[in-house]
Amino acid sequence: MTELYSFDIGTKEKHKVVLDKNRWLGSIQLIVDGNKIKSKMTWVGGKKEYDFEVGEKEKHRIKVNIEIPKLFPAFRKWAYVVSADGKEIANFSK
């Protein structure tokens, strides 16, 4: 797995969110505080969205939108948009 992006969220209740990708298997993993919360393999292009909440007392809504090329996705860049609490915090292609 290759780490694509990571960020810390929270003021009193801190959490680390990591987005990993295995280019050859076409899998995405979302990890919060070292615990895998979502994992998905995808072989077809299109749009994928992951929406989840982190925190117990201090809750934060995290969304990850991924645009996967329809032709030869393993060999082309994927576009990512990451938002926390409705605000975009990252927009990149890898």
Image: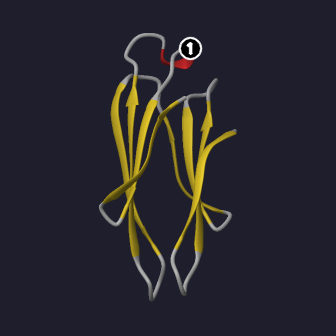
Q: Secondary structure at mark 1?
A: helix
Q: Is residue 93 left or right of residue 36?
A: left
**Which is nearer the eye, 14 or 41?**
14
Q: Position of residue 33 (x, y in %)?
A: 64, 68
Viewer-side residue, 58 vs 90: 90
Q: Amino acid at mark 1?
A: Phe
Q: Residue at x 54, y 87 (%)?
A: 12
- At horizontal 38% and vertical 23% (from top left) the residue drawn is 45
Q: Residue 27, position in %: x, y?
A: 56, 36
Identify the residue at image location x=41%, y=10%: 71
* Quadrant of the rendering where the C terminus is positioned: top right
Question: Can see residue 46?
Answer: yes
Please name the residue that numbered disc 1 is placed on: 75
Q: Is residue 48 above or below residue 59?
A: above
Where is residue 39 drawn, in percent x and y? 53, 48
Q: How many marks?
A: 1
